[in-house]
Image (cartoon, rainbow, N blue to C red):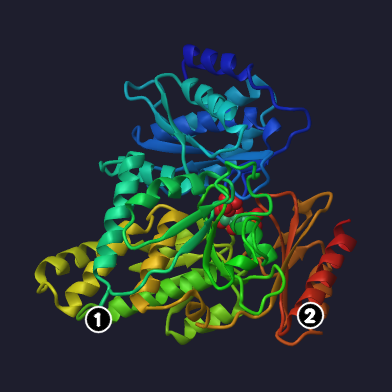
Amino acid sequence: MDKTQIASLLKSCDLFPIPQGLKLSYGTAGFRGDAKLLDSTVYRVGILSALRSLKLGSATIGLMITASHNQISDNGIKVSDPSGGMLSQEWEPFADQIANAYSPGELVSLITQFVEKEEIPIGDKNGAVVWLGRDTRPSGESLLRAAEIGVSSVLGSVAIDMGILTTPQLHWMVRAKNKGLKATENDYFENLCTTFSCLIDLIPNNKLEVSKLLVDGANGVGGEKIEMLKGSLKNLDLEIRNIGRDGGVLNEGVGADFVQKEKVVPLGFGLNDVGMRCASFDGDADRLVYFYVPSNSDSEKVELLDGDKILSLFALFIKEQLNALEGKHSRLGVVQTAYANGASTDYLKQLGLDVAFAKTGVKHLHEKAAEYDIGIYFEANGHGTILFSESFLSLLVAKQKDLTQGSEEHKAVSRLVAVSNLINQAVGDALSGLLLVEVILQHMGWSIQKWNELYKDLPSRQIKVEVPDRTAVVTTSSETEALKPLGIQDAINAEIKKYLRGRAFIRPSGTEDVVRVYAEASTQEAVDSLAKSVAQLVKEFLG
Ligand code: G16
């Protein structure tokens, strides 16, 4: 790096001193924490994004300011690689190092070493390009400015503010841009409408009365965006609540994380909505869950259709289309995490599917799903999508041209091609996921209740435990057993043994300052008791 570049970094770095005592690590989906403490981190990730772009031939990189499901006072940062997927995990240690470099000298020295090691063509005539997006958090705007300064401190780089977006919109746009496709927000919406309409037209005997879908927007960006899309969607009657306009607070008593963890109605929903099909987004609209208030309900409890059930619905539909294809045997696989309900895994296996497991975090599931011709991945919390390999997609497109229009095989191929265009190929996307669920339900002629009957969830419970240092919990790579603190796993095993179909594990969250406890057992009473005793063990060993 030449002197001018070093001077530029030193100058901008002075604007963003690291708060005393702050120690952050690149977590499940980037850096996250109290927004007031994040200026220096976001500025540094701005620098990293510019370097990443330069390393990859000035390809466009995405930088999203969001803390997704976390409380409104938090914020964070997610980085999209040129493919639209998450930042390559190989760069995470560098992200950790620079985020925690206290002095400007240390920061510049780390960057200099990294630039040399990675042979990053800094100072070349083609500069870096970074697209910035943010969710609706009030802290987003000033953090975005810090990111811009970070990007611009790498000389010749351009930071473009794309405005308020959902995380999956930014990932989609970055992917499209780097593929040389139309990549504006309008293009994103237009693509959703066209492909949704195409799938609706392919529904056999499409004379169904379409019932209203109620959407909980988590008082965040997703509600706003689906409201914009609403008028352009044919065959879909939407009512959107929790858009964040009537004093509702982001993720507070609303949203996918709340509904999935608590299994109760979000604010704005209640006994008047008994039996209605409802969907819930999270704060940056990359997660989706469905729910309904059961008819026998006299409480706030809901019937939850989580990521596992969405995965099962998608798998069933894709499998049905693949079965209609002659010739090549395709590799369809599904990917889950340790949080997947045991009953969903049993169901998927009964369907004859290849079920793989990955660690928590879409970056891990995405990688695994990309190994198949069609890989469907979902976390129970509602984060997931369907990936089509380039080679399999080319084969489908060629088939679509060759086959006789109107034949059953042609329709099946056309549905698969349309799904590959509708569903976000970059990352889990609540908007495109919702549209696909709606098409499939109409295709099957199913109500939400009928969909729910695919299998019955084993009773489960998740608890968050606050401890002084969550990093004291170290798990095996599958995350199902704790290696540290020593002795805790034996104690957990002893508890599990007491329960029929008992299963439980602990892991440190990579987005919140808590240890997560997950438990399953044959009855709700049993699982509540198992989760409680495991949480107690966490407190005893780490408290
Ligand atoms: C992020 C990740 C998800 C992960 C979730 C919870 O979601 O993208 O893959 O499941 O965090 O992670 P953890 O259990 O480590 O806190 P989001 O929607 O918050 O960005």
First in sequence: mark 2 or mark 1?
1
Disc on res. 343: none
Q: Quadrant of the C terminus?
A: bottom right
Q: Which residue is mark 2?
A: 525
Secondary structure type for disc 2: helix
Disc on res. 324: 1
Q: Residue at x 24, y 67 (%)?
A: 201
10 Å crowding of disc 2: few (<14), some (14-19), many (20+): few
Q: Where is residue 383 drawn, in percent x and y?
A: 52, 59
Q: Nearer the viewer, residue 489 or 46?
A: 46
Q: Is residue 369 left or right of residue 389?
A: right
Q: Residue at x 50, y 25 (%)?
A: 148
Circle 1: residue type: Ala
Circle 2: residue type: Glu
Q: Where is residue 114 drawn, in percent x and y?
A: 52, 32
Residue 105, compared with residue 238, is above or below; it is above
Rendering quadrant holding ligand 1 = bottom right
